[in-house]
Amino acid sequence: MAGNSQRKGAIRKDKKGATVGSGGQRRKQLKGRGPTPKADERDKHPAAKRKRAAAKREEQSGRRPSSGRGGSGSRSRGGAGGPEYVVGRNAVVEALAARIPATALYVAERIENDERVREAVDAANHQSVSVLDAPRIELDRLADGLTHQGVILQIPPYEYAHADDLLARALDRKQTPLIVALDHVTDPRNLGAVVRSAAAFGAHGVLVPERRAASMTASAWKTASGAAGRVPVARCTNLARALAAYKKAGLFVVGLDAGADVTIDEVDAELPLVLVIGAEGAGLSRLVREGCDVVAGIPIAGESESLNASVAAGIGLYALARQRTG
């Protein structure tokens, strides 16, 4: 027989007879792993990642989508109320510089010599954020397809207030209530800018719907430039019903939309007010518009059809604040 069958020791002789090959040590032979799993059942296969991403999009319908596959930025995990992860060295450094509340900074092993990583670690230590070493496989799991560059910042879930808390905040301060409500504004940067304007012009809080609306993500915190720590954001299940409850409590609901009969300057700012801002282009939804006591507009040039939601909110709040301060 060709090969090494004639080599001494290659043939075992015992009562069961000679066996050519491994010496009959079948107990030590390698066993097959069975059939190859499907592509979408293998954790690291792109098809499996796409399947998980599709399942999360279906589960979290109405929430802000992630920054896109392969990019850096931030994303949410764990469904409603779950933590958010800011990924990528520049994004993490910027988030820490904006003092966005964070609970942990995950850093890959042996990359501490990178300048941006050192900057992120120093900022985290200065803000008493836990710095944790993490293996690449764990960072890959947290990033879920985004390019993390070995650095991930964990942001805790935002603690939303109740709609009643915004009114109580004004009454506790013995001030005339001024609340901003957003109707289907989906960009978190717009939400952050509205929160910043609310803080600048004395509003007592911002109200947003739970579904089909922006939430207080890391992007919103960053745009708010610290104002998110001073102005509460409340959530409601149904904006039209929440506005009706405010009206029963004595507040005057003012919708800010195009095609209005009055301008924002004609609204009596001395009244307890709720200023409702609609999405850019679509404006106020039908039920919300019908629930307003008055719909006011901002005079603009004929060539411009609409204003960005956060810009409209800033102008409207300024007009009301100017009346109140006289």
Image (tube, grey):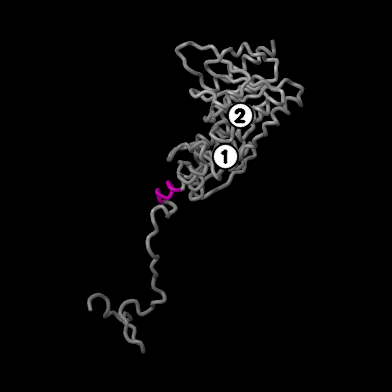
Dot placed on the residue nearer the N-terminal end, 2 or 1: 1
Query: Is 250 situated left or right of 4 in this image?
Result: right
Q: Nearer the viewer, residue 220 or 58?
A: 58
Q: Is residue 188 above or below residue 6?
A: above
Q: Nearer the viewer, residue 193 or 166?
A: 166
Query: Is 273 situated left or right of 85 in this image?
Result: right
Q: Inspect the image, locate mark 2, and give the three-letter code of the amino acid beneath it.
A: Ala
The magenta segment = 45-51
Q: For numbered disc 1, what is the local secondary structure?
A: helix
Percent position (x, y) of residue 76?
54, 41
Disc 2 from disc 1: Cα separation: 45 Å
Q: Is residue 238 above or below residue 15?
A: above
Q: Inspect the image, locate mark 1, and give the three-letter code of the amino acid beneath it.
A: Val
Percent position (x, y) of residue 133?
55, 48
Q: For numbered disc 2, what is the local secondary structure?
A: helix
Q: Is residue 15 magenta?
A: no
* Quadrant of res 153: top right
* Residue identifier under label 2: 240
Q: Is residue 24 above or below residue 139?
A: below
Foreground disc of the pair 2, 1: 2
* Residue identifier under label 1: 121
Residue contact between numbered discs 2 and 1, judged by CB atoms under 8 Å: no
Point 66% across, 24% down: residue: 179
Q: For the residue carrying disc 2, how many other residues have a C-alpha within 10 Å: few (<14), some (14-19), or many (20+)?
A: many
Q: Which mark is residue 15?
A: none
Q: Is residue 320 above or below residue 15?
A: above
